[in-house]
Amino acid sequence: MKTCIPLLMVVLPIIQAVCPDREPGLQPWTPGHSEAHHVTIGYGRKVILTSSATVHSIEILNGGKLVIADSYRPILLRTKHILIGNRGQLHIGSPDCPYKGNLTISLFGRSDDTDTEHSYFGRKYIGVGTGGTLEIHGEKKLSWTFLNKTLHPGEIEDNSYLFERGWGNRGIIVHIIDPKTGEVLHNDRFDTYRSKEESRRLAQYVDVVDNGMILAMVVNDEGSNNLEDSARKTLTKLGSKDFHRLGFR
């Protein structure tokens, strides 16, 4: 005797992911531009940033939530630091809704500012404390590609240049490169951590580089301890925007 067992079919509903910036209950947040504005988002407050803003600092804690809108307009958020404390949340996209907009978070300030320094994170930071949540999800990008032919060492025809490992030990390493061929015409290393004489030698070295050459520089380990103003000014005159601010490591 055969027994028929009835089958029960259950159709589960399709659950659509809610993007962070579409979450119900988010309040628009438009702080404007003031480097003196200390912002605290807490006690269950949930806000969404839809336009560029400048504030002194942002602290998110006690159930507060900040969401960055996935806007077609670029958003620039300038602040000295963002601290995400206990039960605080900052969301930029999600795994199901990767962020597709154009967002820049710029941390401004100087090392000699008189602001109170955080005991762990310092002065300029995006810091997540115990119980805090930071979610950043952008579009997935292809991290590999197929070559259209076998590539053998030394066969690259493009005028390319690569910073290589093993350039030297501590200090500032300089390569002078021919812009037409990519050939390294000359290189040297200056241990401006150890000696001020090395700093003066660096200034003299770059001062006689022919016009039109590419000057590639890299700091290995540490190079600021005995770096004199003569070298800083020489490199700044050549167009460097960062060399005068070179600090410890």
Image (tube, rainbow, N blue to C red):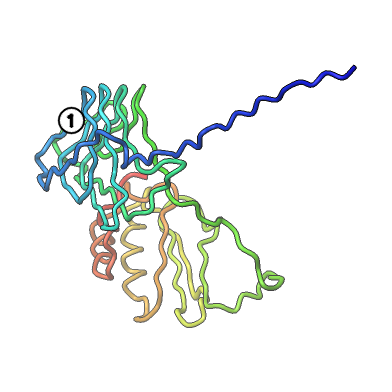
Say whether residue 80 is left or right of residue 188. Answer: left
Residue found farthest to the right: 1
Q: Mark 1 highlights which residue? A: 40
Residue at point 37%, 81% (across, down): 212
Residue nearest the observer in this picture, 72 or 149: 72
Local secondary structure at mark 1 = strand
Within-10-Å neighbours for mark 1: few <14, some 14–19, many 20+: some
Residue nearest the observer in this picture, 62 or 199: 62
From this view, report whether residue 135 is shown above or below residue 104.
above
Q: Position of residue 88 (x, y in %)?
A: 30, 27
Which quarter of the figure is the C terminus placed in?
top left
Say whether residue 11 is left or right of residue 71. Answer: right
Residue found farthest to the front: 1
Residue nearest the observer in this picture, 57 or 65: 65
Residue at point 79%, 21% (across, down): 4
Where is residue 174, by image quadrant? bottom left
Can the viewer see residue 128 in this picture?
Answer: yes
Give the residue type that dot 1 points to.
Thr
From this view, report whether residue 100 is shown above or below residue 40.
below
Where is residue 37, by image quadrant? top left
Q: How many marks?
A: 1
Where is residue 2, by image quadrant? top right
From this view, report whether residue 55 is shown above or below residue 12.
below
Q: Position of residue 219 (x, y in %)?
A: 41, 54
Q: Position of residue 125 (x, y in %)?
A: 29, 38
Residue nearest the observer in this picture, 44 or 249: 44
Residue at point 20%, 43% (across, down): 79
Q: Position of residue 246 (x, y in %)?
A: 30, 52
Which quarter of the figure is the N terminus placed in?
top right
